[in-house]
């Protein structure tokens, strides 16, 4: 299996969205994706791109992706947040995910980032075991906090 890893293009965003939806289903949140292909094209390929994406391609079909963006840590400086890494179900456990993971970490190292961070669900033992085997540390005691659009509107409306 000869996999091509490359930077994603605007024309890949339909495949990227399909993978995002597949991940949402895997994470038992199939109705949570509100993002559209147009959003991805606008936000990733405009004047000030909000993210970068690497794709894994097999025979001209996108079978995996890793979407990430730069952020700034007040403790460490420039860092990357790996938002999602997903491989199509039928290509999992074949090294595609590891290749994408390696591509992102290599990019971070080359860009002199001081940290790469991401979230993993506590029930995803396969992912947790993989990440820890590569030297990543699971941050016990830290909780992910989100405020959705509805909550933002309610909070700001009270201020």
Image (cartoon, helix red, strand yellow):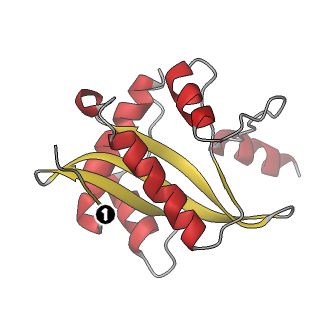
Tag 1's secondary structure?
strand
Q: Is residue 94 left or right of residue 45?
A: left
154 or 86: nearer the eye?
86
Q: 140 left or right of 21? A: right
Seen from the viewer's position, the closer of residues 56 and 95 is 95
Residue 123, x across and y down, in percent: 58, 17
State the image quarter where residue 120 is shown.
top right
Asked where in the image residue 121 lies, by quadrant, the reply is top right
Check the image and name the residue furthest to the left: 59
**Where residue 110 sits: x, y (%)?**
55, 72
| Residue at 62 percent of width and 54 percent of height | 81
Q: Which quadrant would the N terminus be assigned to in this image?
A: top left
- Residue 157 percent coordinates (x, y): 80, 49
**Residue located at (56% from left, 51% from top):** 82
Image x and y of residue 145, in percent: 75, 38
Q: How many marks do you count on the picture?
A: 1
- Find disc 1 in the rendering and name its residue: 6
Looking at the picture, does residue 146 appear above or below residue 14? above
């Amino acid at each position: 299996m000869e996999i091509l890893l490359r930077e994603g293009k605007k024309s890949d965003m339909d495949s990227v969205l399909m993978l995002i939806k597949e991940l949402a289903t895997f994470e038992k949140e199939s109705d949570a994706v509100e993002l559209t292909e147009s959003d991805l094209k606008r936000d990733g390929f405009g004047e000030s791109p909000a993210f970068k994406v690497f794709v894994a391609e097999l025979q001209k079909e996108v079978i995996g992706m890793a979407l990430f963006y730069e952020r700034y840590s007040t403790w460490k400086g420039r860092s990357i947040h790996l938002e999602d890494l997903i491989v199509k179900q039928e290509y999992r456990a074949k090294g595609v995910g590891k290749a994408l993971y390696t591509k992102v970490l290599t990019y971070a190292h080359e860009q002199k980032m001081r940290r790469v961070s991401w979230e993993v669900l506590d029930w995803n033992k396969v992912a947790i075991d993989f990440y820890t085997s590569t030297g990543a540390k699971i941050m016990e005691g830290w909780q992910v906090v989100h405020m959705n659009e509805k909550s933002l509107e309610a909070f700001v409306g009270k201020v």
